[in-house]
């Protein structure tokens, strides 16, 4: 019987109320959630390197620039798993969102995942 990693799902989809209150944050949430397959592949690769790995994603932080580019990505896995953290951060770093007016947006929220 093979071992599989739990699906990494940052948050449930944004609700209609959230979309009306802060449509851009709802978009960030949806775009992050849309990458759950890429997050899953990170966990699967980490399991190939260490089949005994049991890790929980403690949270993620990043900044969205007015251009829509993502920077200053930080992902924390407990217990520490640097290769897994780099892979998950790489998924976020490749995310590009629509431009928005104003200053950079700091995003921080939990990512519900276990393995």
Image (tube, rainbow, N blue to C red):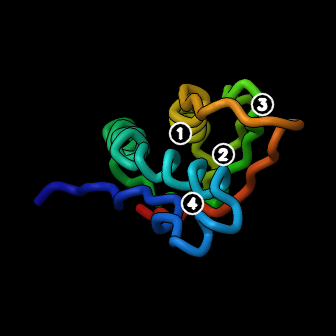
**Can residue 24 be seen here?**
yes
Question: Looking at the figure, which quarter contains the C terminus?
Answer: bottom left
The answer to whether 45 is drawn above or below residue 29 in the figure is above
Nearer to us of marks 3 and 2 is 3
Task: Check if mark 2's residue and mark 1's residue have beta carbons within 8 Å.
Answer: yes
Q: In this view, does 60 lie to the left or right of 31?
A: right
User: What element does badge 4 sit on?
Assistant: loop
- Disc 3 from disc 2: Cα separation: 18 Å
Q: Name the residue under label 1.
A: 88
Task: Check if mark 4's residue and mark 1's residue have beta carbons within 8 Å.
Answer: yes
Residue 28 placement (x, y as % from top left): 60, 48
Question: Looking at the figure, which quarter contains the N terminus?
Answer: bottom left
Spot the residue most to the left: 1
Residue 112 placement (x, y as % from top left): 52, 66
* Sequence-first tag of 4 and 2: 2
* Sequence-first tag of 2 and 1: 2
Task: Check if mark 4's residue and mark 2's residue have beta carbons within 8 Å.
Answer: yes
Q: Mark 2 points at which residue?
A: 75
Count residues near mark 4 (Cα–Cα under 10 Å), then give few for <14, some for 14-19, many for 20+: many
* Sequence-first tag of 3 and 2: 3
User: What element does badge 3 sit on?
Assistant: loop
Q: Choose top left, top right, bottom left or bottom right for residue 22.
A: bottom right
Residue 40 placement (x, y as % from top left): 36, 47
- Disc 4 from disc 2: Cα separation: 9 Å
- Identify the disc placed on residue 65: 3
Nearer to us of marks 3 and 1 is 3
* Sequence-first tag of 4 and 1: 1
Which residue is pictured at 78% across the width and 30% down the height? Answer: 66
């Amino acid at each position: 019987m093979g071992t599989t990693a739990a699906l990494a799902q940052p948050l449930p989809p944004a609700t209609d109320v959230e979309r009306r209150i802060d449509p851009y944050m709802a978009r960030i949430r949806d775009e992050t959630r849309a990458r759950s397959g890429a997050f899953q592949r990170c966990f699967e690769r980490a399991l190939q390197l260490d089949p005994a790995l049991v890790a929980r994603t403690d949270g993620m932080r990043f900044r969205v620039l007015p251009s829509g580019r993502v920077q200053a990505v930080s992902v924390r896995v407990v217990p520490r798993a640097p290769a897994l953290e780099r892979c998950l951060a790489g998924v976020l770093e490749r995310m590009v969102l629509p431009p928005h007016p104003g200053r950079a947006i700091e995003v921080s929220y939990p990512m519900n995942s276990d393995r």
